[in-house]
Image: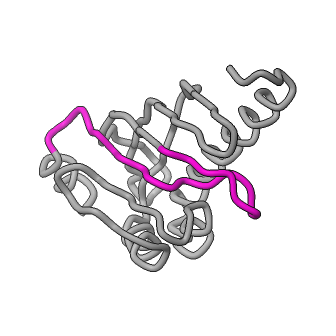
Amino acid sequence: MQDDPLQYFSDYVAIRQLNATYNRYADLADGKSYSSLFTEDAEFNIVGEGIYVGREQIAARCNATTTAVHVTTEPELDIDGDSAQQRVRMLTVLQDGKGTRNEFVASGWYIDELKRTEEGWRYHRRRVELDLEINAVVAKVQ
């Protein structure tokens, strides 16, 4: 934990809010807003599927997924000044489009490097490690 407990808790809340906003924009497939949560030079690595670099590629990847619901747990955080490391459990479910059921798609981990910017905390490196084989996951969401 940082030397200043108030700063630590302020940063912790801000990063939790970043995660919640990420989930909402991902669920909406709002690539422009979603990519604004990353630094300009960010790297988003979905292990086994692809690495997306920069906000433009990250926005395009978000726009490609329109029926998923993203859920994350409380983060494990290590905050050091203007940078932070995060590990957070994630779950993804698929909406059927009719409002009658959701289907489990995947679980895994987000492993992140974050940076404090003028815009607030942002993902600088985000790595998605799924518990399931990537091709099985992709087949469910196509």
Location of residue 127 with respect to 131 vertically, above or below: below
127 in the magenta segment: yes
58 in the magenta segment: no
Q: Quarter holding the C terminus? A: bottom left
Q: Is residue 111 left or right of residue 23?
A: left
Location of residue 43 with respect to 140 vertically, above or below: below
Q: Quarter holding the N terminus? A: top right
Q: Position of residue 81 (x, y in %)?
A: 69, 39
Q: Is residue 79 left or right of residue 95?
A: right
Q: Position of residue 61 (x, y in %)?
A: 38, 70
Q: How many marks?
A: 0
Q: Position of residue 20 (x, y in %)?
A: 64, 45
Location of residue 59 with respect to 28 vertically, above or below: below
Q: Position of residue 63 (x, y in %)?
A: 44, 73
Residue closer to the observer: 108 or 42:
42
Residue drawn where x is 46% and y is 79% of the image: 56
The part of the chain drawn in magenta is 113-133
Residue drawn where x is 49% and y is 74% of the image: 55
Q: Which residue is situated farthest in the bottom direction here?
A: 56
Residue closer to the observer: 119 or 131:
119
Residue drawn where x is 61% and y is 68% of the image: 36
Residue closer to the observer: 79 or 67:
79
Location of residue 100 with respect to 61 vertically, above or below: above
Q: Is residue 36 left or right of residue 52?
A: right
Residue drawn where x is 41% and y is 36% of the image: 91
Q: How is the image coloured?
A: one colour
Most common SS among magenta residues: strand
Q: Which residue is situated farthest in the right direction here?
A: 6
